[in-house]
Amino acid sequence: MNTELNELYTEKDSHVMNVAENARIPGKNRVEEIRKFANISGIKRIGIAHCVAVTKEANALKNMLSNEFEVSIVDCKHGKIPSSAFCGPEAKGVSCNPAGQALYLAEQNTELNISMGLCVGHDMMFNQKSKAPVTTLIVKDREHNHNPIQTFRNTNL
């Protein structure tokens, strides 16, 4: 690696970039690439942090990965924090808890975490607080059924 890249990337970063390149599977889906990345990396424990709106999909992913990995799963309402704790006494319901999700997965000793459908801001907090590296599988997009690329395809670019 040249000197400029050595300033940007550590040896560990370079390793991740190399594994990412080797995990690419043209014509395959992201789940298969995550699986391959984890296998090449020697990862044994995967965490899934998800929004309750995609619980069915998160459970399906857990089932898909469980034959090769120990999978821990946690939804965004983990810890059942009242919304009033963040949004004032008039707020109703249970708040999302991205820091709690990250803590739970850290307690499970996950080595790679997958984010599924977390709200904007909550995903940032989860990524920041996660002890393990995070990859995103689904992003929340209420208008386009969690497919934000449609925003660009529905406009005249």
Image: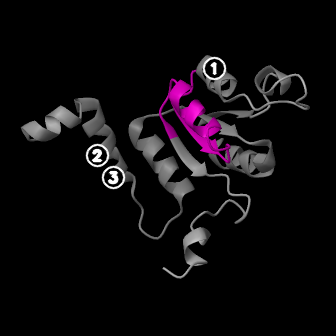
**Nearer to the camera, 61 or 2:** 2
Q: CA distance from mark 2 to mark 1?
A: 28 Å
On the rendered structure, is 118 left or right of 12? right
Q: CA distance from mark 3 to mark 1?
A: 30 Å
Disc on the earlier residue, 2 or 1: 2
**Nearer to the camera, 136 or 59:** 136
Q: CA distance from mark 2 to mark 3?
A: 6 Å
Q: Which mark's residue is nearer the viewer, 3 or 1?
A: 1
Task: Say what secondary structure mark 2 lies in.
Answer: helix
18 vs 69: above or below: below
Task: Say what secondary structure mark 3 lies in.
Answer: helix
From the image, which quarter does the N terminus lie in? Answer: top left
* Residue at 28% from the left image edge and 46% from the top image edge: 18
Neighbours of disc 1 within 10 Å: few (<14), some (14-19), many (20+): some
* Residue at 74% from the left image edge and 58% from the top image edge: 142
> Residue 116 in the image: x percent, y percent?
65, 46
Q: Is residue 82 visible?
A: no
What residue sits right under mark 3 in the picture?
Answer: 22
Q: Which mark's residue is nearer the viewer, 2 or 1?
A: 1
Amino acid type assigned to the residue bearing label 1 in the image: Leu
On the rendered structure, is 97 left or right of 131? right
Q: Which mark is residue 154?
A: none
> Residue 24 in the image: x percent, y percent?
39, 58
Q: Are marks 2 and 3 in contact (CB under 8 Å)?
A: yes
142 vs 65: above or below: below
What residue sits right under mark 2 in the picture?
Answer: 18
Which stretch is magenta? 109-134
Amino acid type assigned to the residue bearing label 2 in the image: Asn
What residue sits right under mark 1 in the picture?
Answer: 103
